[in-house]
Amino acid sequence: MTPPYVDATDPRDVLRLLRRRGWILLLCAIAIPAAVYLYSERLTKTYSSTVVVQPQASADPQAILSGGAGSTPGNGAGVASIAQTGSVRATAARIQHKPINAIGGVESSSDEDTGFVTIRVSGPTATQAQDNARAVAQALGAERKNRAIKQIDTAIATLQSQLPRTNDPVRRRTMQDQLQQLQTVRGAQSQNVVVVDPPGLGSLVAPQPRRNALLALIAALLIGTGLMVLAERLDRKLRKPEELESLAGVPLLGTIPYEAFPGAPPSPRVSEAFQTLRDSLTYFNIDRDLTTLVVVSPLKGEGKTTVASNLAVAFARAGKRVIAVDTDMRHPQLAIRFGLENSLGLSDVLMGDAPESVLRSVDGIDGDLQVLPGGAPPPNPSELLGSVRMASLLGRLPDLCDLVLIDTAPLLVISDAFALLQQNSGLVGVARLEQTPGDVVARMIELTNTAGGRLLGMVATGAREAQRYGYGYGYGDGYAPARAGSEAPVSAALGASSNGAGAARGNDQPAGSGLGRRVSQLFRPR
C-alpha cells in the first residue's frame, strides 16, 4: 500500500499538514523552551570578574652568566599560560583562606601589542568572583617571583660548585662578581605583575535561561517538524482523493464535499457532486448494462448509506425508475433517510412476502423512486442474504425498474454482504477522507476481488475545499439551515425540483439542492 504523503512542493499540502499536525509543532515550541528555561533557572549560578595585568621585566640568570643585562621584558603569552596553572589557583585559594574549589575557572589571554594580560575568573557570587580575580592576580605575581628565585638559586648553586675548582684568577674573579650579582638580584625579586585594571563586581555568565530557551526554541521547531512528518508517515488515513484512486486501482467516480456532514453549512456543490457521480457511473461504464449497483464500504460512518440514498435520487431525477434496497438488516437506515416506515421490508420478503407489497414510493422528487426497507432485524441476516430467495429477489427486481441500488452493511465489520458481491452489475466503493485508513481500503479491495465482485470505482466522501475538482457552478434551489435534532421525515423536506439538481441528505450524507433543507440531521453515519 502506498503510504500517505505530503508534497512539500505544494503549499496546500503543507498547510493541510499544519492543520492536522500543527499541534505537535506548537506543543514542542512551548514545552521544550519552557522546560529548558525552568531547568536553567534552577542551575547553580556562576559569575565572572575580569582583571587586567601587565607583566614586568623578570630576572634572567643566564643573561647574567653570559655577561648580559640580567633581565628580560615580560612575556605576555607566557604569563597568560602561567595564570591558568593549578599552582596559581592553589595560591589564590590560600590567599583567601578558602578551599581550591572556591576558585572557579580561570581564563586568560594576552594582547601582543600592549603586552597586557586579561584574566577572567569565576565564582558562585558576584563578590566572590571579584575576590577570586584579585587573588589570582596576586597569586600570578607570587608564582612569577617564585619561578624567578628558583632559576636564580639554580644559577647560584652552579657557580658555587664551580668556583672551588677554578684556578684561573681572572675567571675566578669574574665568577665571584656574577655570584654577587645573582645574590643581589635574588634579594630584589618581587611580584613583578602590575594590575592595570582592577577586577569589578562579577557579572552573571551562567546559566543564561533566555539564551538557552531561544536555542531550545530553534531545536524544538526542528524536532516538532520531524515529529509532524513522522506522525504523518505513520498515519495510514487517506488524505487525498487521488490516494484512494491509486490505492484501489479503479477510477475515482466522485468526491463528496465535507459540507455534506453535520455542522457544515449546506452548499450547492453537494448536489452537483452527486450528479457528477451519477454521470461518472453512466459514462465510465457506457458499454455495460448497469441494472444492479451495490454500494459498499469497509467500515461504519464513511457515508455509504449517504451515497446510496442520494445516488438513487440523482438517477431517479435523470428519468430512471429506481428501487433502493436496504440489505443492512441489522441496522436498517435507508427508509428512515426518506422518512418512510421500516416496519415491513427485506426481511419480510425473504420470509415469504411479495416484494411489491413492501415497496415504498418516495414522494417529493421529480422521478420514480421506490425503497425496499430493511425490515425488522432477523436473527440470521447472513443466511437470509445468501439464500435462494435473495438470489431470486435480485433476479426479479430489475424487471420492476431500470436500476436497483443496494445499500449494504460494512464489509469489514460483518460478513452479511459477502453473498451480494457477485449478484450485481457492479460495486461502488465508498471511503471517507481524513478518517478511513488506507490499509482498510486495500483489504476491502482484496476482499471484493476474492469474492468475484466487479468494482466499478471509488467515491471519496468528506473532501475539503482544496480536494475538490472544480464542481460548484451554483445551480440549485437554495438551502435553509437544518434544525438540529429535527426528526421530520425526509420526504417532508424534499421539495419538487425541476432543474434536476438535488438529493436526499443525512448526518453523514450530502444534501441536494432543494432536497436537503432539513435533512442533514436525519441521516446518521453508516
Image (spheres, rainbow, N blue to C red):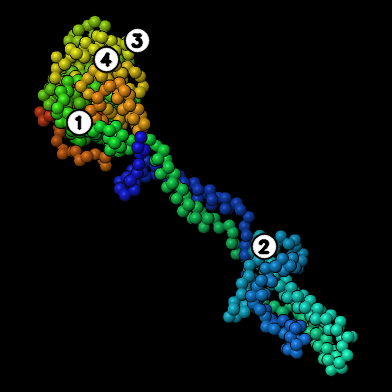
> Residue type at mark 1?
Leu
Q: Is residue 377 visible?
A: no
- Could you tell me how far apart the alpha carbons at marks 2 and 1 are, in whole angstroms? 78 Å
Which of marks 4 and 2 precedes in the sequence? 2
Which label is found at residue 475? none
Residue of label 4 = 374
Residue of label 1 = 277
Which of marks 2 and 3 precedes in the sequence? 2
Mark 2–mark 1 contact, CB under 8 Å? no
Against 42, residue 198 (above or below) is below
Q: Quadrant of residue 487?
A: top left
- Is 382 on the left or on the right of 335, as rendered? right
> Residue type at mark 4?
Gly
User: Which residue is rendered at x = 17% and y = 12% of the image?
Assistant: 396
Give x and y (percent) for residue 256. Answer: 24, 33
Give x and y (percent) for residue 231. Answer: 42, 40
Which of marks 1 and 3 precedes in the sequence? 1
- Could you tell me how far apart the alpha carbons at marks 3 and 2 are, in whole angstroms? 84 Å
Q: Secondary structure at mark 2?
A: loop
Circle 4 residues within 10 Å: few <14, some 14–19, many ≥20: many
User: Which residue is rendered at x = 27% and y = 20% of the image?
Assistant: 421
- Could you tell me how far apart the alpha carbons at marks 3 and 1 are, in whole angstroms? 35 Å
Residue of label 2 = 104
Which of marks 1 and 4 precedes in the sequence? 1
Q: Secondary structure at mark 1?
A: helix
Q: Quadrant of residue 46?
A: bottom right
- Could you tell me how far apart the alpha carbons at marks 3 and 4 are, in whole angstroms? 13 Å
> Residue type at mark 2?
Gly
Give x and y (percent) for residue 480. Answer: 20, 31
Residue of label 3 = 379
- Could you tell me how far apart the alpha carbons at marks 4 and 1 are, in whole angstroms? 25 Å
Q: As drawn, which residue projects farthest toward the top?
A: 352
